[in-house]
Image: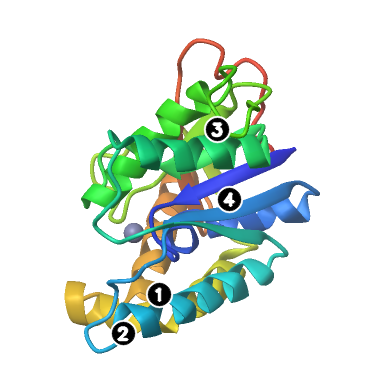
Amino acid sequence: MKILAIGAHPDDLEILCAGTLAKMVAAGHEVVMCHASTGDKGHYEMPPEQLVPIRRQEAIAAGGLIGSRVVSLGLKDGDILADRPADRSLFIEVMCDEQPDMVITHGPNDYMPDHNAVNRLVFDTTFLATLPGSSSRGRHAAKVPSLFYMDNLSGLRFEPTLYVDISDTIDRKLEMLNQHQSQLVWLKEHDGVDVLELAETLSKLRGMQAGCRYAEGFIQHMAWTRPNHIRFPV
Ligand SMILES: [Zn+2]
């Protein structure tokens, strides 16, 4: 199965679903990790031209730990807009490029606008990419993939309908997140959190709910045709 995971920023997938992605790869599935933004504004000292290549390398190193290809849509932090045709086109092209069977992305009630815009763009374009002529390159996606929402940053107002036991991949998840050294600093300074601790705590909370040591929670998007052809692959 081909799984396309799409986060707004280069570290979101690591925080919210990397334990599951690691399990998917280990089970023989192909996982592509995509971030919409380059992460250009995630640092107080480093200007974008210095930060962007560093964040790209951090993301590639994290994906490399599980053998995932990492792609960027090249948008800018704080400048992802669900109703902007150019942004919609970028998402349609990645759906056509990757032809996923299943997509994982942000839920609709996360804490900042880029995450919520990506949620809308993914919902819209997983369908729109299947329409003939939707891509400027004269192609379309073969099917509407199943769609799953990963947890939000604190679990607030997110009621998982599915839990994945990641007790055996929590160390790999944290190792992947630890590749994002620029963000360990940024999130401490800007948001006052140790993001490694946050990710471990959230995984422990979901694990407690699910009856295992560590888990990640997901909500499947239930709408016509979406659930019927996919079983969650791990
Ligand atoms: Zn983010």
Query: CB of mark 4 within 8 Å of CB of mark 1?
Result: no
Q: Position of residue 26 (x, y in %)?
A: 76, 56
Going by the numbered disc 1, the residue's amino acid type is Leu
Residue type indicated by callout 3: Ser
Q: CA distance from mark 4 to mark 3?
A: 40 Å
| First in sequence: mark 3 vs mark 2 | 3
Judge whether 68 appears above or below 164 on screen.
Answer: below
Element under disc 2:
helix
Say what secondary structure mark 1 lies in.
Answer: helix
Mark 1 or mark 3, earlier in chain: 3
Q: Position of residue 230 (x, y in %)?
A: 66, 25
- The quadrant the C terminus occupies is top right
How far apart are labels 4 and 2 at the CA level? 29 Å
Q: Which residue is mark 2?
A: 185
Please, what is the three-letter code of the amino acid marked with disc 4?
A: Asp
Out of 39 and 33, give the one closest to the viewer.
Answer: 39
Answer with left or right where residue 228 lies relative to residue 188.
right
Nearer to us of marks 4 and 1 is 1
First in sequence: mark 4 vs mark 2:
4
Tell which circle, 4 or 1, labels the residue nearer the N-terminal end. Answer: 4
Left or right of 55 in this view: 201 = left
State how far apart marks 2 and 1 are (Cα): 11 Å
Indicate the position of residue 92 as horizontal and vertical percent values: 51, 34
- Residue at image point 27% right, 43% down: 81
Q: Which residue is mark 3?
A: 136
Q: Which residue is mark 4?
A: 165
Q: CA distance from mark 1 to mark 3?
A: 40 Å
N-terminal-most mark, 2 or 1:
2
Dot 2 and dot 1 residues touching (CB under 8 Å)? no
Which mark identifies residue 196? Answer: 1
Dot 1: few (<14), some (14–19), or many (≥20) neighbours within 10 Å?
some
